[in-house]
Image (cartoon, rainbow, N blue to C red):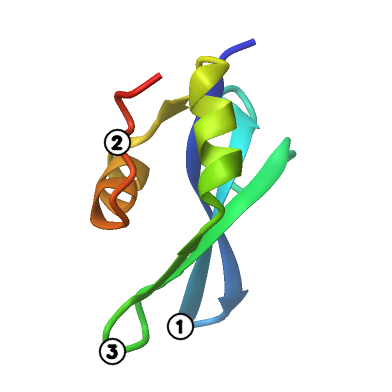
């Protein structure tokens, strides 16, 4: 099983809010997840990014791979996605 740190959409129509989750790469975008590790809201000014750093580091240590967008959010928050 290959785990990815990725975004899943919540929120209303034309009002997206994104959760940062750990999920099996084979599951659909809004499908079954393993754990919620953060939240991202691009609708606010500035964008709101809330990440549980301990959970993210735990998943990265277990081999989870972040998607490109999540990698960018992690770097914005000062978390190095390449550190294990």
Judge the density around disc 2: few (<14), some (14-19), many (≥20) Cα neighbours within 10 Å: some
Which of the image's four quarters has the N terminus? top right
The local secondary structure at tag 2 comes to loop
Report whether residue 2 is seen.
Answer: yes
Judging by the rendered image, the residue that carries numbered circle 1 is 14
Of marks 2 and 1, which one's residue comes earlier in the chain? Answer: 1
Real-space Cα separation, disc 1 to disc 3, in angstroms? 16 Å
Of marks 2 and 3, which one's residue comes earlier in the chain? Answer: 3
Disc number for residue 80: 2
Real-space Cα separation, disc 2 to disc 1, in angstroms? 32 Å
Q: Report x, y in % for residue 8.
A: 55, 53
Disc number for residue 45: 3
Please say if 48 is above or below 40.
below
Q: Nearer the viewer, residue 28 or 7?
A: 7
Q: Is residue 72 left or right of residue 40?
A: left
Q: Report x, y in % for residue 18.
A: 50, 63
Which residue sits at x=66%, y=50%? Answer: 36
Q: Report x, y in % for residue 29.
A: 56, 44
Q: Report x, y in % for residue 14.
A: 45, 83
């Amino acid at each position: 099983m290959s785990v990815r740190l990725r975004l899943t959409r919540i929120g209303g129509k034309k009002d997206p809010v994104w959760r940062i989750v750990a999920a099996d790469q084979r599951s659909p975008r809004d499908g079954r997840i393993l754990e919620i590790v953060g939240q991202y809201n691009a609708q606010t000014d500035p964008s709101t990014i809330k990440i549980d750093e301990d959970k993210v580091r735990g998943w990265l240590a277990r081999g989870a791979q972040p998607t490109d967008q999540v990698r960018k959010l992690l770097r914005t928050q000062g978390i190095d996605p390449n550190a294990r």
